[in-house]
Amino acid sequence: MIETMHPLDALESALQAERRALLEHDVDALLRSTQAKLDALTAAERVAGPDDMARVEELHEMNRANAVLLARRRREVAWTLRHLGRTDSGAVYTGSGYSAGARVQSRWLGCG
């Protein structure tokens, strides 16, 4: 008999995977964990009740911590892109998490 994971357990697992992906700079794992998080959140919204509020708050804090880490990574990427001569075009991303467009700006990096 195969037991199904409770949606809140699945959400916690996805949040932990998201954090690992952010710390390891693993974009593919980040995209997978984000999709798993969204799926688990959808399922959790259907089953979570008043008795689950403490757990939901704990998971909310995990998600907030991941958001802080993600913002830090995003600033690091923006800084790197600026120094490579590429600028971000208003931080607009598609629904799948990819940049909707960035404009390229030439920059001489060699000694002259």
Image (cartoon, grey):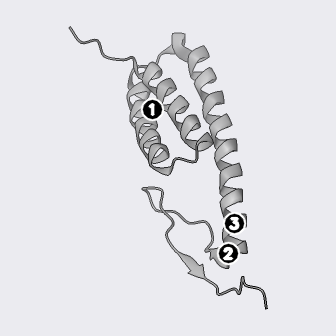
In the rendered image, which residue does mark 1 sit on? 41
> Label 2: how many residues lie within 10 Å, few (<14), some (14-19) or many (20+)?
some
What residue occupies the far front of the structure in this picture?
111
> Label 3: how many residues lie within 10 Å, few (<14), some (14-19) or many (20+)?
few
Q: Position of residue 76 (x, y in %)?
A: 70, 58
Image quarter (top left, top right, bottom left or bottom right) of the C terminus: bottom right
Image point 68% across, 65% down: which residue?
A: 78
> Label 1: how many residues lie within 10 Å, few (<14), some (14-19) or many (20+)?
some
Q: How many marks?
A: 3
In the rendered image, which residue does mark 2 sit on? 84
Q: Nearer the viewer, residue 93 or 23?
A: 23
Q: Position of residue 106 (x, y in %)?
A: 65, 87
Q: Is 23 situated above or below 53?
A: below
Mark 2–mark 1 CB contact (< 8 Å)? no
Mark 2 to mark 3: distance in Å? Answer: 6 Å
Q: Position of residue 22 (x, y in %)?
A: 59, 43
Q: Amino acid at mark 3?
A: Thr
Q: Quadrant of residue 38?
A: top left
Q: Amino acid at mark 2?
A: Leu
Q: Nearer the viewer, mark 3 or mark 1?
A: 3
Q: Earlier in the sequence, mark 3 or mark 1?
A: 1
Q: Quadrant of residue 1?
A: top left
Q: Is 104 situated above or below 25?
A: below
Mark 3–mark 1 CB contact (< 8 Å)? no
What residue occupies the far bottom of the structure in this picture?
112
In the rendered image, which residue does mark 3 sit on? 80
Q: Amino acid at mark 1?
A: Leu
